[in-house]
Amino acid sequence: MVRIEIKKRYTVRKSKLSEIYRDLKENIGQSSELFKSDRVEIVETTADLAIYLVDRKPYLMEIGGSVFPTLHGAVDRPFPEKRITVDPGAIPFMAKGADLMRPGIVSASDDIKKGKPVIIAEEKHNKPLAIGIALMDTEEMMAAETGKTAKNVHHVGDEIWSLEI
């Protein structure tokens, strides 16, 4: 990934704010309430990426055309939706940005849809490791025995994680 630098930062208008929360609610349901705030800012970056600051912290981002929590948001304000749990063997690969392969999956929530963002968490402590785009629905994912199941787009230690605001 190319080094991300901040170009501009400004407060989101109320009309845009309602769109953001509507999209977030479509993705993570009632847990979207965890991210509600009167003060939300948008950070324009040098990358093709929109990051939203909730109470001055990078908790939301626009990914795959959808608003979804960043890893910081998922760690600080945990939610159960759109979650794939992986075994300890997958952790080093996910932390380096590898895509998620089926053999590493222990469980997946029932609400995962192909082409939509998901959170990838480790099994022991249930801590988020990465945000990915699902390559298949839950049923298809759990029925598969091999192959890629999610594309890793944001992981611990990447440019988004290390972005200083």
Image (cartoon, rainbow, N blue to C red):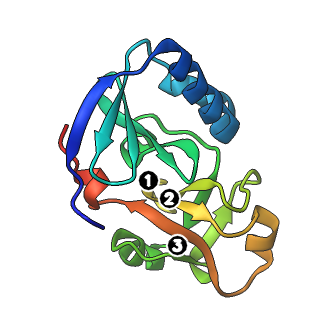
Q: Amino acid at mark 2?
A: Ala
- Toward the viewer: 42 or 81? 42
- Which residue does the image show at 49% across and 39% down from the upper left? 78
Q: Name the side, left or right, on which 106 lies relative to 159.
A: right
Q: Secondary structure at mark 3?
A: loop
Give the percent coordinates (x, y) of residue 148.
61, 80
Q: Is residue 59 above or below residue 71?
A: above
Q: In the rendered view of the protein, which quadrant contains the N terminus? A: bottom left
Mark 2 = which residue?
121
Frontmost residue, 93 versus 26: 26
Q: Which residue is mark 3?
A: 87
Q: Which is nearer the N-term, disc 3 or disc 2?
A: 3
Q: Assign a secondary structure to mark 2.
A: strand
**C-alpha gap between disc 3 and disc 1:** 12 Å
Q: Is residue 59 above or below residue 38?
A: below
- Name the amino acid, label 1: Lys
Asked whether the beta carbons under mark 2 and mark 1 sit within 8 Å of each other, the answer is: yes
- Residue that badge 1 annotates: 127
- First along the sequence among labels 2 and 1: 2
What's under tag 3, amino acid-wise? Answer: Asp
Residue pictured at 38% horizontal, 72% vertical? 97
